[in-house]
Image (spheres, rainbow, N blue to C red):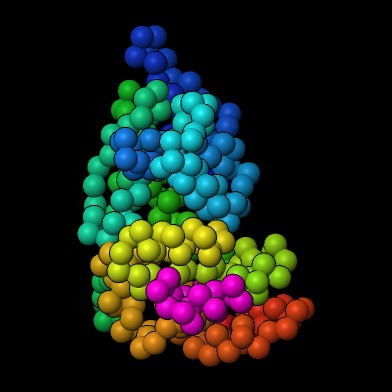
Amino acid sequence: MSLIQAVPEVNVRYSPESQQVSYLPTVDISVAVATPSGLITPIIFSADILGIQDISARVRELATRAKENKLQPQEFQGGTFTVSNLGMFGSVEQFTAIINPPQAAILAVGGTRAELDDNFKPHNKFTATLCYDARAITETSAQRFLDHFAASLSDPDFMMLLMYFSAGWCRSCRMFTPKLRKFYEELDEDRRKNLEVVWVSRDKEAPDQLEYYEKAMPAWYYIPFGDSNIAGFLEKYDVKVIPALKLVNEKGDVVDDRVRSDVEGCSKGDATKCYQKWKEMY
């Protein structure tokens, strides 16, 4: 969460009684999670010192326990900044969120949508809305935060992307997924940080996709079946059968669509060789 470190003015709490703003030394991110009994915001403590994979794994673990009503009060009371992501529901492209006091800001993240640029090339875009308490955060600070947020998306560090089209009902997928997971876990930490795996669900029922994802997958991002962009992904990446694994560059173009066979053919110790081969394709 170097983004919040870059704009610490949004990492604050406000007291209406004293009308004082408290600048906080740690970055503890609350993540909004819908449960059968209502919305709850479990906290990722010291998120500024965690990597993306660690944060993703922590979010999954907290969300699972939140839905099972197994969180301790100290795990959801407090926090310094909240993120609410309704984009996972597919049809929600933009929304405003309610600030979680005594915090002073919340980032509302909508779903991705495909848009054409001036050269008629498709790009995935989404809308993020920063809701903030103007008594604690100035308009200038809010704009700086959004500027840094946009810059972090448009100028990322080197990253390879694997698009994995899979489903729990697919027997071949259930056989291949452990191989892909083993391949990924054989890479050292530095290489894993530069290789992002995104699972695109072909499950039609939410319980099915959650059961398969939570039990079979490590800390990978996933795009649920209801996302409005899945049909576009299937067409763009020419996915006719699953499981399908595509190596994609930062522009969203396929670099190699034979990487599944690379993973299938990897014996122990060969994961690094495959990684290096893929990197040279970039």
Q: Is residue 219 left or right of residue 183?
A: left
Residue at the right extreme of this rendering? 269
Instruction: Tell me residue 107's x, y (percent).
Output: 36, 43
Q: Is residue 161 above or below residue 212?
A: below
Q: Position of residue 31 (x, y in %)?
A: 43, 41
Residue at x 69% of width, y 64% of height? 190
- Magenta stretch bounds: 161-180
* Residue 72 locus on image (x, y percent): 51, 29
Membership of 168 in magenta stretch: yes
Q: Position of residue 46 (x, y in %)?
A: 59, 38
- Which picture quadrant has residue 53? bottom right
Which residue is at the front of the view, 271 or 109?
271
Left or right: residue 93 compared with residue 197: left
Q: Is residue 84 visible?
A: yes
Residue drawn at (43%, 36%), measured in percent from left and top? 69
User: Where is the C terminus found, in terms of image quarters?
Assistant: bottom right
Q: Is residue 257 magenta?
A: no
Q: Nearer the viewer, residue 61 or 49?
A: 61
Identify the residue at horizontal 34%, vertical 43% (top origin): 34
Choose between 244 and 233: the one closer to the eye: 244
Does 149 sit above or below residue 29?
below
209 relative to 218 in the view: left or right: left
**Residue at coordinates 22% horizontally, 59% vertically from top-left?**
91
- Between 17 and 219, the residue placed more toward the observer is 219
